[in-house]
């Protein structure tokens, strides 16, 4: 039997952090269409169930357009059972929307703040595959004491929260890993952490975060997707496989611009450095300029970004290089620039890196350019 474990789709996310209005709307729609792509992929792989381990949506109030699209896909793929465990971003609005349009689809299954269990392979002549899940509501410690399974079954447990090796006060986003060891769990399906992680739970089972289905910001760079769980019903063996699925990927490229004198040289260096990575044109990239540059080096972030706007869906350039100042050169300089640099140099409460940033900002101001902090 095949099952997809997915989490943190964050549908209806506004996507306005980096993007202009037009591209933000495009990205928002792409995230929504990802659910359709996921369902189509599941059907192609002959998957019997899709487990959504929290944060299907991003906001408390889901738009009718997005809710309607999700519902239409659930109704379209009637041979796939959808198991939806709500996360800390999810609320009642989607379920309210479904009820307002008619009956809840028979292939959509929900969880509550007490343990709910579903047999995923009813009628099988082999080992039962049972999915157990509970939604956290300041009840982590209490629900763990009530957890009980048949050790002869293949047991999947779905939870949404941050893994923690210590049991403490109840929190909505804490999964107490120690309390789940030795409890007959084969696969602990988690949501909330936005990067893929597969680790040993105990001598019997593993726990897994599939990560978010699609990166939304530059703190979510790299591959994103879901986990395909292939379970041998006869033997009880299983193989979890991460499937890279993101339509667009986000990348952060560090470019050392030490000793480069102007934006043209920097553009040439960036072109050379990133060519080795074969980034896709539809991806998003943040270029971090690092290294040590002369205080008179011309570094125009906007101009540099413009040089690559046709190569990517979105480009952001951040200048994090350090300014190296030859203070002796300005020791006898009677100009305003010389006076300013000596003033910075003589500051005893400022470290060298901060002095460099102050010099850069001051020289930009003296030349009439925009100050970049």
Image (cartoon, rainbow, N blue to C red):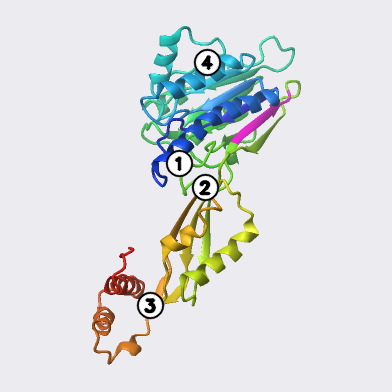
Magenta span: chief secondary structure: strand
Q: Mark 2 points at which residue?
A: 313
Front residue of 53 and 248: 248
Mark 4 or 1, nearer chain start: 1
> Any mark on residue 236, and which?
none
Q: Does residue 31 lie above or below 260 as drawn?
A: above
231 horizontally vs 367: left or right: right
Question: Closer to us: mark 3 or mark 2?
Answer: 2
> Any mark on residue 109, and which?
4
The magenta span reads 226-232
Badge 4 density bin: few <14, some 14–19, many ≥20, Cα 10 Å:
some
Mark 2 or 1, nearer chain start: 1
Q: Name the residue under label 1.
A: 23
Q: Residue furthest bottom?
A: 332
Could you tell me how far apart the alpha carbons at marks 1 and 3 are, in whole angstroms? 36 Å
For the N terminus, which image quadrant?
top right
Which residue is at 50% across, 21% downward?
A: 69
The reply to whether the C-beta atoms of the residues labelled 1 and 3 are less than 8 Å apart is no
Residue 315 visible in the picture: yes
- Determine whether the residue tagged by mark 3 lies in a helix, strand or loop: loop
Mark 3 or 2, nearer chain start: 3
In terms of image quadrants, where is residue 12?
top left
- Determine whether the residue tagged by mark 1 lies in a helix, strand or loop: helix
Could you tell me how far apart the alpha carbons at marks 2 and 1 are, in whole angstroms? 9 Å
Q: Mark 3 points at which residue?
A: 295
For the C terminus, which image quadrant?
bottom left
Mark 3 or 4, nearer chain start: 4
């Amino acid at each position: 039997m095949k099952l997809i474990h997915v989490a943190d789709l964050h549908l209806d996310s506004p996507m306005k952090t980096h993007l202009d209005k037009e591209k933000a709307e495009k990205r928002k729609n792409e995230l929504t269409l990802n659910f359709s792509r996921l369902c189509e992929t599941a059907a192609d792989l002959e998957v019997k169930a899709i487990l959504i381990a929290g944060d299907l949506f991003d906001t408390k109030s889901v738009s009718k357009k997005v809710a309607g699209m999700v519902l239409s896909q659930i109704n379209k793929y009637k041979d796939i059972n959808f198991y939806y465990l709500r996360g800390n971003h999810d609320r009642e609005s989607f379920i309210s929307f479904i009820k307002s349009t008619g009956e809840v689809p028979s292939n959509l299954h929900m969880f509550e703040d007490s343990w709910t269990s579903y047999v995923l392979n009813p009628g099988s002549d082999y080992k039962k595959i049972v999915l157990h899940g509970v939604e956290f509501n300041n009840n982590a410690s209490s629900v763990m004491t009530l957890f009980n399974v048949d050790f002869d079954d293949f047991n999947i447990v779905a939870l949404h929260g941050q893994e923690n090796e210590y049991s403490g006060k109840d929190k909505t986003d804490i999964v107490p890993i120690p309390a789940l060891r030795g409890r007959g769990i084969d696969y602990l399906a988690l949501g909330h952490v936005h990067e893929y992680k597969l680790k040993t739970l105990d001598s019997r089972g593993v726990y897994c975060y599939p990560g978010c289905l699609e990166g939304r910001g530059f703190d979510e760079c790299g591959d994103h997707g879901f986990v395909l769980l292939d379970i041998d019903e006869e033997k009880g063996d299983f193989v979890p496989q991460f499937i890279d699925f993101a339509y667009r990927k986000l990348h952060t490229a560090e470019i050392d611009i030490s000793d480069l004198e102007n934006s043209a040289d920097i553009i040439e260096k960036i072109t050379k450095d990133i060519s080795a990575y074969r980034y896709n044109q539809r991806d998003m990239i943040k270029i971090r300029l690092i290294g040590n540059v002369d205080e008179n080096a011309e570094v125009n972030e906007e101009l540099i970004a413009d040089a690559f706007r046709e190569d990517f869906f979105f480009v952001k350039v951040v200048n994090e290089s350090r300014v190296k100042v030859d203070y002796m050169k300005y020791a006898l300089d009677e100009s305003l620039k010389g006076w300013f640099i000596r003033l910075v140099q003589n500051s005893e409460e400022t470290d060298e890196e901060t002095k460099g940033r102050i010099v850069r900002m001051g020289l930009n101001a003296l030349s009439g350019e925009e100050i970049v902090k």
